[in-house]
Structure formats: C-alpha cells, structure tokens
Image (cartoon, rainbow, N blue to C red):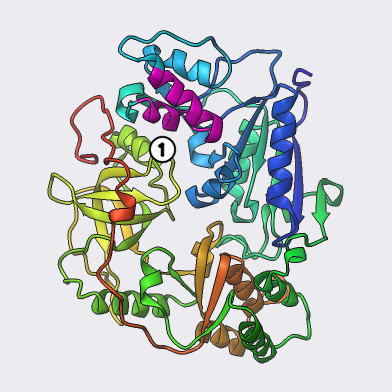
Amino acid sequence: MPPAGGANQVMAVTGKAGSGKTLLLAELYKAMQAVGVEIVSGDYESRKRKDKRTLAILAPTNKAASVLRLRGVPATTIHRILYTPVYDPEYERMAEWLAGSGERPVVEGMTEIALDRAAAFYANNKSIPGALAAAGLRGSDFITGWKRREEPLDIGFVDESSMLDDKQFEDLKEIFPTLLLFGDPAQLAPVKQSGTMVFEKLPEKRVLTLSRIHRQDAGNPILDLAHTLADPELTFEAFERMIEQAAARDDRVVWGQRVEVDLMARSPVLVWRNATRIRLINAFRAVHGAPEDALLQGEPLICDGLELPLKHRKKRLDLEARGLIKGAQVIYLGEGRKPGFSRLHVMGAEDPQISAASIVKIEKPDEEEPFIPFAARMGATFLHGAAVTIHKAQGSQWETVQVFAPDLAIAARMGRSEAGQPLWKRLAYVAITRAQERLIWVVRNRLSKPSGPLEIDDLRAAPAALLKLDAPVDALD
C-alpha cells in the first residue's frame, strides 16, 4: 500500500544476544522484498515513485553492517543513507537493471560477459558497486560525487540501535516516517547518554521484547556465560570460576595466561581502561620491532575522525562514504604516493581499499600528548587498533575475541553501576558477545611472542581505489 503519511511511527524490538533480533530483521527484509517493497541501499537509489514503498536497512558502523550483509541483507551505515552517490548517466542504466527497475542495458565498451558477471555478483551480494567492480569498473568510473539527502525516505530498520545517541535518533526520525529499531538493552549505552538507550525512552507499548534465547539451543558456551550475568547474586569471582570450568570442557572458551599477539593484528584486545589499551598497543609494537617514526605494513588502526576544514566538505563526504567514519577499523597497507598519505584497508567496507591523507597518533604510557610518526596537513586521524575499549567495540564482532580480564576485575572492585546494574557485568556482557566463535579470557598481564612478521597478503585482493574529485585536493591521493 502507498505510504499513508501522518505522524512518525517508531517501534523497537529488543532482546539479549542470541534472541533472534538479526535473524528477525533478515526475515522481515525478505518478506517485504517479496511483496514488492523497494530496497534503498547506500550505494544506489532508484527514481522515486509515489505508489512504491521503500525500505532502508542501517547499522551504526561498517562492521555491524557487514554482519548483516553476510546474511544477504543489503545493509549500509547511517552515514551512507544521509549522503547518496551521484552516478554517471552511462552506468546508471546498469544500476537500474541490477536493482530490478530497468531492462538489461547496452553499454558502450561493456561486453555481455561483463554484464553477466555483474548480474551473478549482485545475485549473491546485494552491492551495486561490487557488481560493477565485477564487470571491470572502479568507483571513480561510475560515481561522480555525493549529495546530502534532501527528501525523506519511507521505512527504516536500524540494527545495533543501542549505539545510537539522541542526535542520530533525531536525524533518523527526520528521514524515516516509519522506523524500527533492533537493540540489546544489556549493552553499554553511548557515552554522554546518562546510561540510557534511545529505545528505552519509547512508550512501553512501542517496545517488543524477545525473551527466548535461540542460539543457545546449539549449546553455545559463550552465550551461556553472557546470560548468566543477568543473575543479580553473581559475583565477579564466581563468574570467573564459571569461565574456567567452561574452558575445561569446551575449546570455544579459553582460560588465557597471556595475550596472543598474533590475533591483535586483526581483532583487537578488548579492555576497559585507556591506560591498559595504551600499554598493550605499545607492547604489540615493541614485540614486532616497529620503529618510532613509521608504521609497519599490517598494523591495525582505528579511525578517530576527520580533521578537515569546512571548505573541504566534498573530501569529507568522499572519505566518510568510503568507510572512514569515526570508529572504523583499518589495516595499514603502506605509504601513499605523497608524504603523509597512507594506503588503507577498511575492515567491513564493501570497497575496502583506499588511499587517504592520514594523521596517525601513537599514544604513550604516562604521556599526555600522543606521538605522531607522520602526518598530512589534514585528513583522517587514526589511533592504533591493536587494543580498543569495550565501549568502542560495540557493534563489531570478530571470530576470536580476547578480553583482558584484570581490567574487569578492577571495575568489579570499584563497585560502579550503570543503569542499575554493576558496570563490570555490562562490560563483560558486551565484551564476550563480540566473539562469534571463540572467547579468550586473558587473566594475566603477559604478551606472547609473534609467530612471524605482520602480513597483508590476505588483504591484497583488489587495488586501492582512487576517488574522482572535482579539483586537485590534499585529502585524497
């Protein structure tokens, strides 16, 4: 049915890890697509029709969106829905065809085999840029720029909505008359949100709670541990004994005597305190023999934002649209062609390899100001990513996760609470539910030796993308 208009509608589906939130979102998407609802993604949007309903599926981070895409759901980041790409008219027909809104096109210089490759890619991965890349094109061939969304959309699904702050929530309500939030009330609230999540402010009748834990049916010891944290009588010491017992009977849980340095290059150690994070990062760099004035290929970084003046708004849009938003996890691939530029692999992004002006900050123990091994005059700023705080890890998942338990022991001894629950329990819940397959509960302040040098060969599947710009600039290589 066409949109009815009227007042905004917001509803939330909440539940703890394993309750089926993501599965439900995926099934709702499939059902809505089956009845003809048009899917609006961050990479292409068909011409608007008054009689056509539309749906966009969003997540706060690239990593969270990539978890949905692995389920066949064409999710994108909130930022990518605020800004939409402008396609070259020659390739817009291809995008319309792939999205199911047009006939198979005839494009000069594009063979039938190339079109078949694009169609086959899109059938399995709902990404139009990916499909065009499979046909032999690059982003700079078919995207000519980015524009701020001017008109509202229709229906929005938002996964990992526990991460939304009030400003993002208001922006989303402006864009989507109908908004459905999916979130976990046991996670950590965003910083400066007074311990509350946006869906907790909705009227009770607007919140549906999933209480049955489906993923535990498979006997998942990680989720078993997560859900024991709901017991108000559980102490930190008792919880650690449960972890040790789980490790003795199931190899998916490990009682770790040291931090495994090889894992830190792709999945950061999760900590509570910044001081611990900085010490682990410096230990990681030391065991790899990293020089003070340079990065090694393969070192992990976390985007800390963009330092660009207002006059370079287009460069900011280009960088953010390619995944360099605050909190993005990237791997350093080497120096760019200009001083201060870096070649980077953005984890979880659909087109992950870019070259950008970089300001890299290496924080040091007991020093207020970070050391900057190199920097462009402006561009994307990065902190080291071998360890991150549990707050920053929300919305991300990794196959294997290391949790630095001594930090949580300190939180338990301090007796701090958040939203009526001991803080250590919220930290532990978020940390261990970041693990998809394996949890390592590290109980000692020790670091293993690396089995070899840092590697980037597994990330070299595609060349670094070059973004087309209106004029020469300093923020992109």
The vertical placement of 477 against 457, above or below, is above
Q: Amino acid at mark 1?
A: Ala
Can residue 208 be seen here? The reply is: yes
The residue that appears at 48% across and 70% down in the rendered structure is 389
Are there few (<14), some (14-19), or many (20+) residues within 10 Å of tag 1? many
The vertical placement of 365 against 211, above or below, is below
Can residue 386 be seen here? The reply is: no
Front in this rendered view, residue 257 or 425: 257
Which region of the structure is painted magenta?
113-135
- Would you identify the image quadrant in which residue 367 lies? bottom left
Residue 120: in magenta span: yes
- Would you identify the image quadrant in which residue 296 lies? bottom left
Front in this rendered view, residue 416 or 389: 389
Q: Please identify the quadrant where the C terminus is shown.
A: top left
The residue that appears at 40% across and 70% down in the rendered structure is 263
Where's residue 356, x and y in %?
Answer: 25, 45
Where's residue 291, x and y in %?
Answer: 16, 71
Front in this rendered view, residue 170 or 327: 327
Q: For mark 1, what is the residue? A: 321
* Relative side of 463 to 196, left or right: left
